[in-house]
Amino acid sequence: MDLSPIAEDYLTVIYRLESEHGRPVRTAEIGDEIGVTAPSVTSMLDNLNEEGLVDYTPYEGVELTEEGELVVRRLIRNHRLLETFLTDHLGYDWTEVHEEADRLEHHVSDELARRLSAFLGDPATDSHGDPIPNADLTMPEETPYTPLSECEAGETVVVEQVPHRDPDVREFLSDAGVGPGTRITIDDVPPVDLLIVELESEGHTVTLPIRVARRIGTRSVDDRVY
């Protein structure tokens, strides 16, 4: 099936919103994410529904079909393999690769993805710590990371997974010196939705909003495999 990049973007947005909300996705939510009008969303959903990629009922919402989910998992696999290649072999920083991979993911064949994965050593996670679907498009089990927000004062952990889709959050973490591999110690957890951590490599403390710390995956230094 030949899909345009914009059609694939619609499916990806539906996949993510379904995962976040656990319910059918509203057309207004899709329009807000993609930045298009309601009639444009409705037209695309009608087309995707005819292709058997979504189940769409006007005024009730839209869900991916099994076939639609497979399309998205293929895109996720392409995207995360590309991010890993760009950071590991082309010198990109983890903060730079998301948009590059967004542009390229639509043009990767299954054969190229297979060869790229083999070249990278068939990684289970990408450069941000997110799981990579395997060649059968099976998503690995949830990664065994502990959200930074759940760590206790005095605990030392290593950052394994970082949020990177939101440019503002990405820039904030980069400026603070927090990224994959950063070793930090929890200094304090004030009762005001903040977390104070000390960065071992930088030798200074950083205050993180709990809403950001909740999206940072960590592993205890005692559990980390080197």
Image: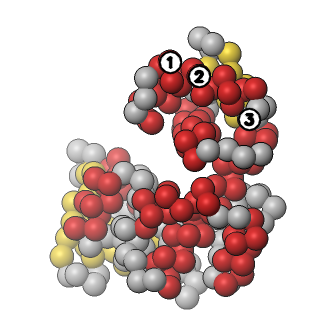
**Is 39 left or right of 152, judged from the image as shown?**
right
Residue at the image point whose x is 43% and y is 29% from the top = 36
Which quadrant of the view contains residue 16?
A: top right
- Can residue 12 be seen? no
Name the residue at the top extreme: 59
Judge by depth and name the residue closer to the eye, 126 or 33. Answer: 33
Rendered location of residue 116, percent (x, y): 66, 77
Vertically, is 193 above or below 158?
Answer: above
Do the residues under discs 1 and 2 have CB atoms within 8 angstroms? yes
The residue that disc 1 covers is 39
Vertically, is 91 above or below 127?
Answer: below
The residue that disc 2 covers is 43
Specify few, some or many for label 2: CA neighbours under 10 Å numbering under 14, 14-19, or 20 or more.
Answer: few
Tag 1: residue type? Answer: Pro
Rendered location of residue 76, percent (x, y): 62, 57
Q: How is the image coloured?
A: secondary structure
Do the residues under discs 1 and 3 have CB atoms within 8 angstroms? no
Judge by depth and name the residue closer to the eye, 159 or 66. Answer: 66
Residue 53, disc: 3
- Can residue 96 be seen? yes
- Mark 1 or mark 3, earlier in chain: 1
